[in-house]
Amino acid sequence: MADVELGQVAFELVVGTPLALAYLGAMFVPLERAFAARPAQRAWHPGSSLDLAYFAGQYLVWGAPTLWLLGQLRLALHAHLGPFQAWAQALPGWLQVVLVVLGGDLLVYWFHRACHRFDWLWRFHALHHA
């Protein structure tokens, strides 16, 4: 298996970042309108530029090394994960989706807890609560 190409990671980020922004906007703008914490606040407000910069930074600055690192990790663990992959691929598709969503939610939950627990993570995570 070839090394993970940085060019491929960059392409995915350049294409994926605007798509993710459009998707998140399509999801959360209507939700914010329906269940607004501040009903008088418009969708684009004075703090939106900072929010947009933070979003771009999260995807572009952290996304590139994260995707590359995960790709390298996948390559390194591929030989060890063969039996698990065979087991998972034998499951019905709907069950694979359920397990991936649950597993992903658990990882995000515990990482979020770690961001609140460890000072060095909190310094980055505090922006999320600003």
Image (cartoon, helix red, strand yellow):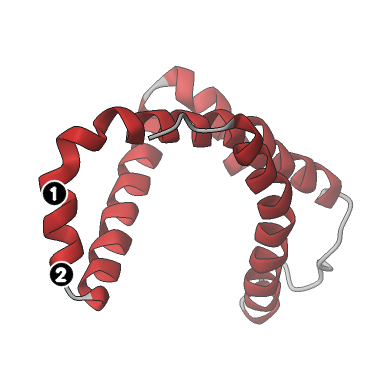
Decide if residue 111 is on the left or right side of residue 5. Answer: left
Q: Quadrant of the N terminus?
A: top left
Q: In the image as oriented, which residue stretches furthest toward the top?
A: 120
In terms of depth relative to the viewer, which is nearer, 116 or 75? 75
Q: Locate residue 36, reporting x and y percent.
A: 66, 72
Q: Locate residue 56, reporting x and y percent.
A: 73, 42
Element on which disc 2 rests: loop
Decide if residue 22 is on the left or right side of residue 116. Answer: right
Residue at the spot of label 1: 84
93 relative to 121, above or below? below
Kind of residue at badge 2: Leu
Which one is earlier in the sequence, the residue at label 2 or at label 1? 1
Residue at the spot of label 2: 91
Element on which disc 1 rests: helix
Q: Locate residue 38, reporting x and y percent.
A: 72, 67
Decide if residue 46 is on the left or right side of residue 4. Answer: right
Kind of residue at badge 1: Phe
The answer to the question of whether label 2 and label 1 lie on touching residues, with beta carbons closer than 8 A, is no
44 relative to 33, above or below? above
Residue appearing at x 34%, y 32% in the figure: 75
Residue appearing at x 78%, y 41% in the figure: 53
| Alpha carbon distance from label 2 to label 1 | 11 Å
